[in-house]
């Protein structure tokens, strides 16, 4: 796989993009990172060509061929680069469970989180619902160090990018996740000890400042 050409179309605050960055780091894959200017809605020709259906980042381009949708791309990375950490379990049942929880994350978290920071008025209800979902995830984690058990994997990758956004949700939603979900926060801290994660996730304050500027742009503040 040494001659592979790997390009990632991404946008720095994206928790979806972070998934691919972490997965590629876990596998030790070298790639070219290309930042899309989504803030000014200036999508590159390459992005429009590689993801003509959704026109969204992240897109993994492997030897000229695009893989869209972050969960699908993480699974692809796991299958193509067998060296490095295994991200999805081989056991069919365990794999189904990992996919179930990653799907739960995508069905629930982002929409609620968006309502917290991008709207005025609905923050409290969305915050309560988000905390409920995070508690469900905390239950799924149980006493294990990572969602899949002893090693960092697919569900951890699906969720951990949100850790850089939690401070923003807490600030605009007026809640404290360490009080609400202490085990989940301990899990996030554990994940942050991994280089693939700590080197990928932007600083929480940088996300907060970014969100404040978005709110200004959209006339929320
Ligand atoms: C979501 C990607 C996405 O929302 C995935 O890859 O998992 N289900 C997809 N990408 C956003 C940026 S992150 O919020 C995006 O590219 N938005 C541009 C647009 O909507 O035009």
Image (spheres, grey):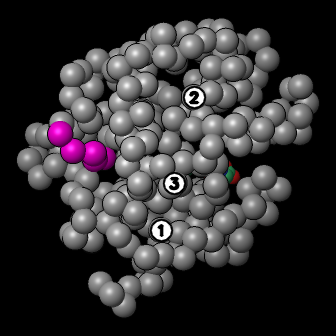
Which residue is most to the front? 193
Which mark lies nearer to you, 1 or 3?
Answer: 3
Q: Where 196 sits versus 134, above or below?
A: below
Q: Which residues are magenta?
A: 150-154
Q: Earlier in the sequence, mark 2 or mark 1?
A: 1
Left or right of residue 43, residue 107 in this image: left
Q: Where 85 sits versus 163, above or below?
A: below
Instruction: Give me the residue at 32% from left, 40% from top.
Output: 155
Instruction: Give me the residue at 27% from left, 62% from top.
Output: 78
The residue tagged 3 is: 200
Q: Earlier in the sequence, mark 1 or mark 3?
A: 1
Residue 166: give its label: 2
Instruction: Give me the residue at 11% from left, 52% from top.
Output: 90
Left or right of residue 128, residue 87 in this image: left
- The percent coordinates of residue 177 (x first, y second) are 51, 17
Left or right of residue 113, residue 216 in this image: right
Placement of the C terminus among the 4 image quadrants:
top right
Bin the neighbour count of mark 2 within 10 Å (Cα to Cα): few under 14, some 14-19, many 20 and up.
some
Placement of the N terminus among the 4 image quadrants:
bottom left
């Amino acid at each position: 796989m040494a001659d592979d050409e790997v390009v990632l179309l991404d946008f720095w605050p994206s928790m979806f993009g972070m998934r691919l960055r972490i997965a590629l780091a876990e596998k030790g894959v070298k790639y070219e990172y290309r930042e899309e200017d989504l803030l000014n809605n200036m999508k590159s020709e390459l992005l429009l060509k590689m993801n003509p259906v959704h026109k969204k980042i992240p897109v993994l381009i492997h030897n000229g061929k695009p893989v869209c949708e972050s969960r699908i791309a993480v699974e692809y990375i796991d299958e193509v680069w067998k060296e490095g950490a295994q991200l999805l379990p081989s056991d069919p049942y365990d794999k189904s469970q990992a996919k179930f929880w990653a799907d739960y994350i995508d069905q629930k978290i982002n929409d609620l989180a968006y309502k917290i920071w991008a709207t005025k008025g609905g923050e409290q209800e969305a915050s309560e619902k988000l905390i409920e979902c995070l508690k469900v995830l905390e239950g799924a984690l149980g006493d294990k160090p990572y969602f899949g058990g002893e090693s960092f994997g697919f569900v951890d990758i699906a969720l951990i990018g949100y850790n850089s956004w939690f401070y923003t949700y807490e600030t605009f939603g007026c809640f404290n996740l360490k009080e609400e979900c202490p085990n989940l926060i301990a899990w996030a801290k554990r994940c942050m000890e991994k280089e693939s994660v700590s080197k990928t996730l932007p600083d929480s304050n940088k996300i907060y400042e970014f969100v404040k500027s978005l709110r200004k742009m959209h006339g929320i503040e």
